Image: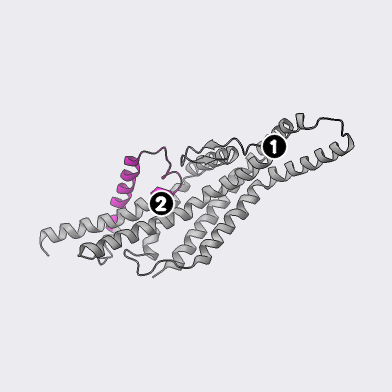
Amino acid sequence: MSLAQILQWNLSLFLLILSRWAGMIILAPVFGARGVPTFIRLSLAGCFTVIVYPLIFATHPTIPSELLPYIAVVMKEIFVGLVIGYVVYLLTAIFQGAGQLIDFQMGFSMASAIDPVYGAQSPLTGNFQMILATMLLLATNAHHYLIAAMVKSYAYIPLNPSKLPIDYLYFAGLVAHVFSLSAQIALPVFGALVVSDIGVGLLMRTVPQFNIFSVVFPVKVIFGLIILILTVPFFGEAVSHLFNIDMTWLLNLYQGWKQ
């Protein structure tokens, strides 16, 4: 091959690797935060591409030389990165769902905050739990495992995969697991507030002259915050367990996508 062809092949390989990393960084927690400038995200994807490039180059992948087939391969790689980023993003969705349940019971559902990670509206408690979980993941270097899992994807899903995941039951199961885990995270506070509502109902039946609505809202807020504070010491273990579950989902995705 001529020097121009060698340069073209290497550039094409670099862009394919960059496409997968860029797709993952768009959706993955921490990396895809809205507060992170686009230039920083692209630079981060480029740095990962430079590091991974020699590993992929050693496998001598087949790259189409025609324009349209090459664009199709680029789209495939972006899709692979988006799917991986989506599975990792489900970890964030669990805490948002738990916060939604807690806020609904505490009466905070009408006052939603702006999510500093993705810039969308999110529940107040879910916002707090998500930020706390992100700090714990960074403090324990869990993002290193995410990078390692992304590198491992090339062992299961080579460049230009011949098939795409069509097992819709797998993704439906992920959604079901997200709802289930969200309910489990919210259960201590949600359950305590339900019990308090039952007590308030019994009090209203016993003393109907008492205007319970003037005190029930602040009492529920204070009671909910106390239960939430009491569960904080166990939050780190819950985040670690959920992260392991999320990595298991990612491994199942790779195995189902294995060529």
Which quadrant would the N terminus be assigned to in this image?
bottom left
Callout 2 environment at 10 Å: few (<14), some (14 to 19), or many (20+)?
few
Mark 1 / mark 2, whichever is N-terminal = 2
Q: Is residue 224 left or right of residue 120?
A: right
Residue 208: x %, y % from top left: 87, 34
* Badge 1 vs badge 2, beta-carbon distance below 8 Å: no
Q: Residue at x 30, y 56 (%)?
A: 17
Residue 147's tag is 2
Q: Residue at x 58, y 37 (%)?
A: 124
Task: Report how far apart the C-alphas of labels 1 and 2 lie in the structure.
Answer: 37 Å
- Up/down of 10 relative to 163, above or below: above
Disc 1 packing (10 Å; few <14; some 14–19; many ≥20): many
Residue 106 sits in quarter: top right
Q: Can you tell which mark lies on residue 224?
A: 1
Coloring applied to the structure: one colour
In the rendered structure, does residue 78 fall within the stretch colored magenta?
no
Q: Is residue 194 above or below residue 222?
A: below
Residue 116 visible, this orientation: yes
Q: Tell me where the magenta segment starts and ends, as one range.
A: 26-54
Instruction: Give the percent coordinates (x, y) of residue 33.
Output: 43, 42
Q: Between residues 56 and 211, which one lies in front from this camera angle?
A: 211
